[in-house]
């Protein structure tokens, strides 16, 4: 996070992970941005790492471009296809916007691509298309993430179904 002294504009690199968690838990976004580490021994983090390392090994082409980390990249004819691998489709809206963020970043670099969400445990795939409506919602989410980052304390915790799988659950609910 950097505050530009000249115009006091808040500048921050927003990652796909920020986008993903914004649509699930805005408190978690604040904790990440402020470098408060989750429980690294949490079994759900281990499962996610395992799935990422062992799924779709034939098309494994993970690549880091700037502040985005694309799980899979391949060519389909002349079309570039980027893929995002998720453990389940339970949080599909978050996954869609994370992938749209990647497509948007590539688009700004002059690279046209198509996106696909991959859910190996469910043997499911969803194509994600870039639309102006999605772009507007993504830009609003990014603006809100910057607002959350500027907050002096995290948003209050809210009990949601994701909490039981969250590596921050003890941080939020230790006194309960």
Image (tube, rainbow, N blue to C red):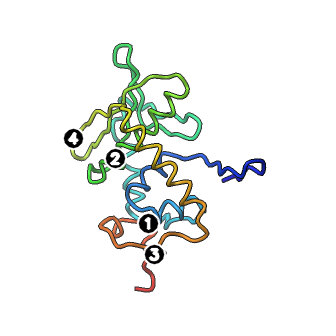
* Badge 2 vs badge 3, beta-carbon distance below 8 Å: no
Q: Earlier in the sequence, mark 2 or mark 3?
A: 2
Q: Residue furthest top?
A: 78
Residue that badge 3 annotates: 172
Left or right of residue 163: residue 168: right
Badge 4: residue crowd in 10 Å (few <14, some 14–19, many ≥20) = few
The answer to whether 113 is drawn above or below residue 105 in the figure is above
Secondary structure type for disc 4: loop
Q: Please provide percent x and percent y for residue 14.
A: 55, 47
Left or right of residue 100: residue 88: left
- Residue 86's tag is 2
Secondary structure type for disc 1: loop
Residue at image point 35% right, 65% down: 165
Q: Please provide percent x and percent y for residue 111.
A: 49, 23
Residue that badge 1 annotates: 167
Secondary structure type for disc 2: loop
Q: Residue furthest bottom?
A: 175
Badge 1: residue crowd in 10 Å (few <14, some 14–19, many ≥20) = some
């Amino acid at each position: 996070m950097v505050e530009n002294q000249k115009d006091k504009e808040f500048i921050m690199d927003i990652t796909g992970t920020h986008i993903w968690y914004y649509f699930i838990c805005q408190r978690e976004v604040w904790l990440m941005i402020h470098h408060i580490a989750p429980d690294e021994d949490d079994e759900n983090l281990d499962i996610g790492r395992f799935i990422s390392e062992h799924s779709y090994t034939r098309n494994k082409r993970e690549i880091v471009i700037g502040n985005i980390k694309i799980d899979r990249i391949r060519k389909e004819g002349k079309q570039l296809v980027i893929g995002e691998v998720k453990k389940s489709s339970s949080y599909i809206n978050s996954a869609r916007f994370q992938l749209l963020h990647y497509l948007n970043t590539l688009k700004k670099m002059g690279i046209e691509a198509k996106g696909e969400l991959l859910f190996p445990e469910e043997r499911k795939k969803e194509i994600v298309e870039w639309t102006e409506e999605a772009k507007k919602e993504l830009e609003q989410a990014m603006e809100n993430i910057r607002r959350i980052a500027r907050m002096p304390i995290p948003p209050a915790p809210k009990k949601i179904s994701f909490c039981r799988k969250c590596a921050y659950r003890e941080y939020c609910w230790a006194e309960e």
